[in-house]
Image: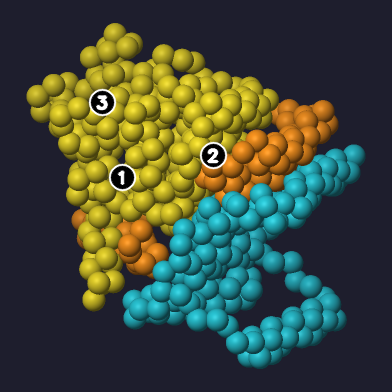
Chain colours: A yellow, B orange, C cyan
Amino acid sequence: MRDLLVFGWGLALGVVAFSLVGGLTAAFVLLERKVSARIQLRVGPLHTGPHGMLQTVADLIKLVVKEDVRPSRADPVAFRLGPLLTAVPAILSLAVIPFGGPLLMRGLNVGVVYFLAVPGMTVIGLLLAGWASYDNYSFLGGLRSSAQFISYEIPRTLAVVAVVMLAGSLNTVDVAAAQQPWPYILLLPLGFVVYMITTLAEVNRVPFDIPEAESELVAGYHTEYSGFRWALFFLAEYGALFAAAAFATLLFLGAGSGPFLPDIFWFVLKTLIVVFLFMWIRWTLPRFRADQLMRLAWKVFLPLSLVNLVLAALVMQAIGPR
Amino acid sequence: MNEPYQSDVVFLVGFGLAIVLLPLVTLLVFRWVRPTHQGGIKAEAYESGMPQASVPRRPFHMAYYNFALVFIVFDVETLLLFAIAPVLRDLGWLALAEVGAFILLVTAGLFYAWRKGVLVWR
Amino acid sequence: MTTATTVLFVVFGVLAALSALYAVLTRYLLRSIVALGAFLTALAGIFYLLAADFVAVVQIFVYVGGIVVLMLFALMLSSSGVRHPTASSDRRSLGSIVAYAVGGMLVWASLRSTLPGMPAALPDSVPYLGRAFLNEQLFPFELIGVILLAAVVAALALVRKERA
């Protein structure tokens, strides 16, 4: 009986998480276009609704009623699986983010590793989508994004290990609680920088958007997709962006702690600030080349993350055991 | 902690089921709305307006494979560190030295791959 | 185990068995690899139900996010074809003999062994694991480091030979 309740609660939160990501994607796309327009001295969407506010809503309606085109030589099974395997893990990772309030989710005793492990399945989706499309652009895009993903995953994971060393738990709720007086951005500034930059690479954003470099690869792995399947890639991208920003809030920015207002307010506010930071970077910096990208991952960020581990060990000794 | 760990699985399965089913249902429902005129030139792969000159089914750039190999080794290393990291703070310098030795061993692997030029994109 | 977890155990078990069968029986290499990924994920669910939560996420992290990806890379970079290469018939019969022998041994062993019952709730397994690695299991732990080092060297040697 109790299990049934837990199951229903999981189901309900799953629906909430999916709708949240859907709504946020619409909001983020609009925000992104407005931010980029502002940075590049343009105006951005303006005509649908007041200040163009309804533009992405209109886009969304267009996407679900648009034809689902599949190239005749594409592998039908892999072509259908690709977008699903990309979008589902990205949203699934939200299951361990303790937003607070009714969205407390689950800490899990291994929540931190869960958050890093589950999005790893996205790589399979990208490879399948790119390969199934039977298109050179898609194929190259799929390979590039997955190679980039796995290369940046190592330094990113090591940056998270440093946080776990200080927090003394893999449970995401405990990690949040452990930062009560000092958020870890103050104790591990290098770790924060490594986490943020490698995360940019993991969610394929400029300056790390080589897989989707429009001038070289059209749209990378989702070149051949249209309609709702294409929208799933978009959901995956912004879902992963949101999840990664929430994880940064959890690990480095003291999670939901803040004066007066409830946890969930501070948590979401901090997450949105991180999202804005990601967008700002995207529209400020030029794109790296494929070889620079890989060199950066293995020869700069991996050593840096090892240095960060040593720093974390020193900090740990300085503040003593719990 | 007062809940049995199995309820975590029950929760995750519910959560996952919702997230897998929702896109499938959306796809199914809008099937009746969206047009389906498959075939013709539209079903050709996009090659910037040209007919497809070559197909992506041929041997390609081994460098990707090398990176994947090195990745798996470091993947295993970082996961072992995850098992140790939570207790490290309560243990002393000795434990730290033990972990340090482990990390040094794996870093030697990184150094080797570096010197052999595997980490260079070509 | 409660009713719900028993149901989940059966569901994961059936999923694992079906995807494993599909991985073996399908003639498409790519689908075979994807089915292997599904099998490994279902296995992770079983691990989690058996209180090995850390092993479960490691399973996803290393096998699904690592090994399966490596296999996909190998397929996509090397082959022009999608199908399994067909083996010669005597190699196939030799293979099936070995497979049946190993399978029979596993069935025999699992029928003979008595498994301990599951405790209702376990303490958090990760600190236990970490302490074990740094105390009584220190030697195996450092040995893993040596093996990983050897793995890098060996893998790169293989790759370089192929290029030369």
Left or right position of A184 against A137: left
Q: Amino acid at mark 3?
A: Leu
Q: Is residue A201 above or below residue A91?
A: above
Residue A264 located left or right of residue A74: left
Please state which amino acid type lies under the numbered disc 1: Pro
Residue designated by label 1: A98
> Where, by quadrant of the figure, is residue B66 drawn?
top right
Label 1, secondary structure: give it: loop
Which chain is mark 3 on? A
Share a chain, discs 1 and 3?
Answer: yes
Report which residue position mark 3 lands on. A31
Q: Residues within 10 Å of mark 1 (few under 14, many from 20)?
A: many
Q: What x and y, as percent, mark residue A1?
A: 23, 76
Q: Which residue is mark 2?
A: B89
Q: Quadrant of residue A156?
A: top right
Return the residue found at the far left. A50
Q: Percent from the top left, x then y, of residue A134?
A: 55, 48
